[in-house]
Amino acid sequence: MSDVITTAVEALNTKIDGGFAAGTAKFVIEGEGAIVIDGDGAREADDDADVTLTADVDTFKGMLDGSVNPTAAFMGGSLSVDGDMGLAMQLGAALA
């Protein structure tokens, strides 16, 4: 597991204490790996998900630390979303 993935899993589990019950989401961090978030929390995995969000390392780190707005990243093309857009919006709200 990369340091980026390890740090991201820890940060996500802190932000979504108790898991994300709305569905299953996957973050693909280009060049690093994937993280799945569900009712059990966040973990390194590349399982199928209801929504997949793909971004580079800098965009993902910015979304975690609050310096990058996920909606602005999506509109600007630095974050792609494949699947349930409503679930992606719920996840963004949960991570804020």
Image (cartoon, rainbow, N blue to C red):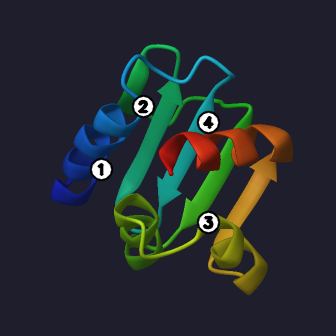
Question: Image point 71% across, 81% down: which residue?
Answer: 77
Task: Tell me if residue 46 can be seen.
Answer: yes
Q: Which residue is mark 2?
A: 16
Q: Position of residue 19 (x, y in %)?
A: 46, 20
Q: Which residue is mark 1?
A: 8
How far apart are labels 2 and 4 at the CA level?
A: 12 Å
Read off the residue under disc 3.
70
Q: Nearer the viewer, mark 2 or mark 4?
A: 2
User: CB of mark 1 within 8 Å of CB of mark 3?
Assistant: no
Q: Residue at left 46%, top 65%? A: 63
Q: Position of residue 7 (x, y in %)?
A: 20, 50
Residue at point 64%, 76% (across, down): 73
Say whether disc 4 or disc 3 marks the residue closer to the N-terminus.
Answer: 4
Give the residue displayed 54% in from the left and 24% down from the top: 20
Q: Is residue 63 left or right of residue 85?
A: left
Q: Dot 1, how many residues are within 10 Å of its Cα: few (below 14), some (14-19), or many (20+)?
A: many
Q: Earlier in the sequence, mark 1 or mark 3?
A: 1
Toward the bottom, the furthest residue is 76
Secondary structure under tag 4 reads strand
Q: Amino acid at mark 1?
A: Ala
* Residue carrying label 4: 25
Q: Nearer the viewer, mark 1 or mark 2?
A: 2
Residue 13, quarter of the rendered image? top left
